[in-house]
Image: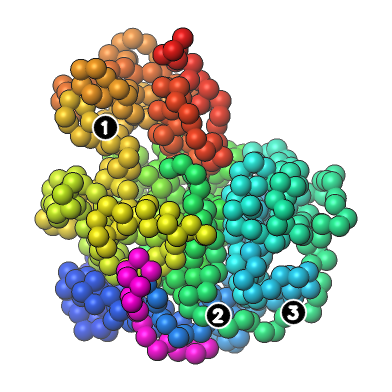
C-alpha cells in the first residue's frame, strides 16, 4: 500500500513531531518496534503516555492497570486522584507563561468573535461551578448540556466536572423527543440550555424544545438558560435560572479530587444502530485518550489552533475540548453552518483564525466539492499542518480533492476511526509513515487492533471484523445503568475480544481499510461486500455527488444491491442510470451488479452528517425504522419510502 502513498513524511518534519521525539526518548528508533511494544505491555505504555502528556495528580496511582474483574471492566490508574479540569485548564492558568494564552476562539454564524485566555476561562468555570453548587448540584449528580457550540457550553461542562458532577452533552439540533429520552436515561438533575441560536440565518428557538424535554423528565429540577438572542422566550419561575445569574457568584476555588474511575461524562450515541447507548467515561479515561490521540497522533501542541467541525453532543466535540486544552492548544468553536452565508465559510474560518489542525467528515467534503475549488483559492490556508477526518469511510475522489486543494498536496490527512465507546481512535494515520488515500497507516499506539474472520482467526488481505484484544485507557466503563447491554454489544462473540462492529482489512505492510459497519454488509450471490465499496464506484462518476447502497431480499441472489444516487448538476436519465449500473458491474463483477439505481434529492443522515443506511433500508422496504431521533432530514426518508409500494398493499 505504501507504493500508493501520496504523502510521505520528510525526515526533517518527522523529527519535529511529538510522537517521534517521545519514541526516541523511550529508546526506540523504529516505529514498528515501538508500536509492538505499546500493546505487548499496555500497562507500561499507558503509564508512559500519561507522563508524556504531563498529567497532574493530587495523589499518584498505586497500580497502572488492574484486570481482576476481567478485561471488560479494567481499572486504570487505581488509587490515583485527579481532576480533568485541572489538567485541561487550571494548570495552564496558574503558570505565568501560559495564563494569558488563548484557550478558546469562538465565532458565531453572524460573525461575532471572542477570544478567551486560560486564566479568564478558569475564572468563568469557577463562577459557574459555584453557581451549580448553590443550586443543589453535588458530586455524582448529572448535568445535561443542551447548547450550541459557544464558550458557555465548554464552561458548563468543565464547571460540572470541577465539582465532581457528571456532564452529559446532548446534540444541539435534537428536538424535544430525543433530548427528553437522554434526560430520562441519564437521570439529569439540571439542564443547561440557550434561548435560541442562528442556523443558516434563521433563529432556532432552543428553549421551547428544552422546556418540552424537561417537562417529560421528572429528574430535572433546574434549567439554566443562556440568553444569546434576546428572544421572547417562555420562563418557568420555579425551574428556570438565568445563566448570567448563575455565574454571579464568587469563584469556587476548590476543585474536587476525583478517583481515576469516577465518571466525568455520559456520552450518548447518535442512535444509528438502534436505541441510544450511554457510554460512561471517567476522569482518567476519555480526557487522557483524547489528549493522546490529538497530541501524539495529530501532533497538536502549545501554540496550535485546533478546530473540528462538530457538536458537543457527538464524540468529536469533547475530543476537541480535551484533546486541545490538555495539550495547551487553543480550540476554535463555530456555531453555524460550514457553507453559510457562502460556500467559502469553512476556508474563511481557517484563514482568519490560523487553524493548524482541521477536522471534517467525508460527507462535508463531498458536499463542498460541488462548489468547486475557487472558493478555497481566495484564502491563505498555509497555517494548516494536519487535516483530520472521521465519521465514515472515504471515497477516492473526495479524499484526493481535499488533499490537493485544501492541503495543496502537502498537508497529511489524518484518517481517524474509533467511536464514542473508544474515547477516540482505534486506527489513524501516524505522521511517521506514508499516507495513501482513504486508508489508515497504523493502529493508534496502545490499541491492540486486529481483523478476525468468522471463526475468530486473524486474517490479512481479507475483509473481516475489526476487533481489540486488550483494554485501553478511555474504554467506556460500560453503558449507564446497562452493564449487560454493554457486555452483549461488544464482548459476546468471542471470549475477551471487543468486536467493534466495523468491516476492516489490513495488508502485510500495515495499512488498514474500513469498509463500513459489519451489520451493513451485503451478501449478493455469496459475495460479501461492504456498501462503501459500491458507493465509491458510483461517486467516481462525475454526475454523482453522493451515493447510498443497501442490500434487499432477493429470491435468486439472497440479497440484491439497490443504489441511491444524489446528483451534482446532472439531470436524471435512463442513460445515466445504465452508465452507473455498467460502471458498478465492470468494477465489482456481474454478481455485484446493482438491481436498481434511484436518483434522490438526498440521503438520510444524522445531524453530524453520517449516512444512516439502516433508515435507508427501512424506508425503502417499509420496515419499522426504530430510533429516528438522530435523523436530520425526515423529508428524504419519506421520499425514499415513496419509491416503492409496501409489499402487503
State the residue position of label 3: 251
Magenta-drawn segment: 57-73
Residue beneath the point at 60% across and 67% down: 166
Residue beneath the point at 35% across and 73% down: 69
The numbered mark, 3 or 1, whose residue comes first in the sequence reads: 3
Name of the residue lying farthest toward the right? 237
State the residue position of label 1: 522
Give the percent coordinates (x, y) of residue 502. Answer: 30, 47
Instruction: Classify residue 193 as left or right of residue 348.
Output: right
Give the percent coordinates (x, y) of residue 589. Answer: 15, 25
**Circle 3 or circle 2, nearest the eye:** 2
Crowding around mark 2 (Cα neighbors within 10 Å: few <14, some 14 to 19, many 20+) is many
SS at mark 1?
strand
The numbered mark, 1 or 2, whose residue comes first in the sequence reads: 2
SS at mark 2?
strand
State the residue position of label 2: 258
Amino acid at each position: 500500500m505504501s507504493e500508493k502513498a501520496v504523502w510521505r513524511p520528510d525526515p526533517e518534519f518527522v523529527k519535529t513531531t511529538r510522537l517521534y521525539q517521545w519514541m526516541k526518548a523511550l529508546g526506540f528508533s523504529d516505529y514498528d518496534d515501538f508500536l509492538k511494544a505499546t500493546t505487548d505491555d499496555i500497562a507500561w505504555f499507558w503509564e508512559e503516555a500519561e507522563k508524556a502528556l504531563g498529567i497532574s495528580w493530587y495523589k499518584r496511582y498505586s497500580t497502572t492497570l488492574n484486570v481482576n474483574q476481567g478485561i471488560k471492566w479494567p481499572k486504570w490508574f487505581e488509587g490515583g486522584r485527579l481532576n480533568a479540569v485541572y489538567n485541561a485548564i487550571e494548570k495552564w492558568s496558574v503558570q505565568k507563561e501560559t495564563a494569558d494564552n488563548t484557550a478558546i476562539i469562538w465565532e458565531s454564524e453572524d460573525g461575532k468573535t471572542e477570544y478567551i485566555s486560560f486564566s479568564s476561562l478558569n475564572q468563568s468555570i469557577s463562577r459557574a461551578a459555584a453557581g451549580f453548587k448553590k443550586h443543589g448540584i453535588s458530586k455524582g449528580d448529572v448535568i445535561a448540556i443542551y447548547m450550541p457550540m459557544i464558550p458557555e457550553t465548554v464552561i458548563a461542562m468543565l464547571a460540572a466536572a470541577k465539582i465532581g458532577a457528571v456532564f452529559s452533552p446532548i446534540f444541539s439540533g435534537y428536538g424535544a423527543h430525543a433530548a427528553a429520552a437522554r434526560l430520562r436515561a441519564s437521570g439529569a438533575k439540571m439542564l443547561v440550555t440557550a434561548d435560541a441560536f442562528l442556523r443558516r440565518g434563521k433563529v432556532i428557538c432552543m428553549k421551547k424544545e428544552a422546556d418540552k424535554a424537561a417537562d417529560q423528565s421528572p429528574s430535572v429540577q433546574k434549567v439554566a438558560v443562556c440568553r444569546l438572542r434576546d428572544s421572547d422566550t417562555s420562563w418557568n419561575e420555579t425551574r428556570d435560572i438565568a445563566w448570567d445569574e448563575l455565574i454571579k457568584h464568587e469563584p469556587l476555588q476548590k476543585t474536587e479530587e476525583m478517583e481515576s474511575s469516577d465518571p466525568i461524562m455520559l456520552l450518548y450515541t447518535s442512535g444509528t444502530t438502534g436505541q441510544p447507548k450511554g457510554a460512561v467515561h471517567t476522569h482518567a479515561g476519555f480526557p487522557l485518550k483524547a489528549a493522546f490521540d490529538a497530541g501524539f497522533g495529530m501532533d497538536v501542541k502549545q501554540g496550535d489552533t485546533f478546530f473540528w467541525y462538530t457538536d458537543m453532543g457527538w464524540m468529536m466535540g469533547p475530543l476537541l475540548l480535551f484533546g486541545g486544552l490538555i495539550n495547551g492548544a487553543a480550540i476554535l468553536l463555530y456555531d453555524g453552518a460550514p457553507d453559510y452565508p457562502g460556500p467559502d465559510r469553512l476556508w474563511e474560518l481557517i484563514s482568519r483564525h490560523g487553524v493548524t489542525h482541521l477536522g471534517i467528515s467525508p460527507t462535508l467534503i463531498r458536499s463542498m466539492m460541488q462548489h468547486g475549488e475557487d472558493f478555497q483559492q481566495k484564502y491563505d490556508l498555509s497555517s494548516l499542518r494536519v487535516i483530520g477526518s472521521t465519521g465514515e469511510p472515504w471515497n477516492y475522489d473526495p479524499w484526493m480533492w481535499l488533499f490537493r486543494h485544501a492541503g495543496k498536496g502537502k498537508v497529511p490527512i489524518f484518517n481517524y476511526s474509533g467511536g464514542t465507546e473508544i474515547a477516540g481512535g482505534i486506527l489513524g494515520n501516524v505522521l511517521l509513515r506514508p499516507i495513501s488515500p482513504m486508508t489508515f497507516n497504523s493502529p493508534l499506539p496502545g490499541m491492540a487492533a486486529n481483523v478476525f474472520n468468522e471463526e475468530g482467526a486473524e486474517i490479512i488481505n481479507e475483509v473481516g471484523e475489526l476487533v481489540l484484544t486488550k483494554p485501553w485507557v478511555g474504554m467506556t466503563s460500560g453503558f449507564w445503568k446497562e452493564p449487560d447491554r454493554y457486555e452483549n454489544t461488544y464482548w459476546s462473540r468471542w471470549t475477551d475480544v471487543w468486536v467493534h462492529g466495523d468491516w476492516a482489512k489490513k495488508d502485510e505492510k500495515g495499512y488498514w481499510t474500513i469498509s463500513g459497519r459489519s451489520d451493513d454488509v451485503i451478501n449478493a450471490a455469496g459475495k460479501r461486500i461492504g456498501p462503501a465499496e459500491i458507493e465509491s464506484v458510483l461517486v467516481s462518476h462525475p454526475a454523482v455527488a453522493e451515493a447510498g447502497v443497501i442490500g434487499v431480499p432477493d429470491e435468486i441472489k439472497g440479497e440484491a444491491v439497490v443504489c441511491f444516487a444524489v446528483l451534482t448538476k446532472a439531470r436524471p436519465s435512463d442513460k445515466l442510470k445504465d452508465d452507473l449500473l455498467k460502471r458498478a458491474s465492470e468494477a465489482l463483477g456481474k454478481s455485484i451488479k446493482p438491481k436498481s439505481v434511484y436518483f434522490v434529492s438526498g440521503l438520510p443522515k444524522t445531524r453530524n452528517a453520517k449516512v444512516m443506511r439502516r433508515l435507508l433500508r427501512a424506508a425503502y422496504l417499509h420496515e419499522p425504522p426504530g430510533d429516528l431521533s438522530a435523523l436530520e432530514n425526515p423529508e428524504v426518508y419519506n421520499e425514499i419510502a415513496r419509491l416503492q409500494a409496501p409489499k402487503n398493499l
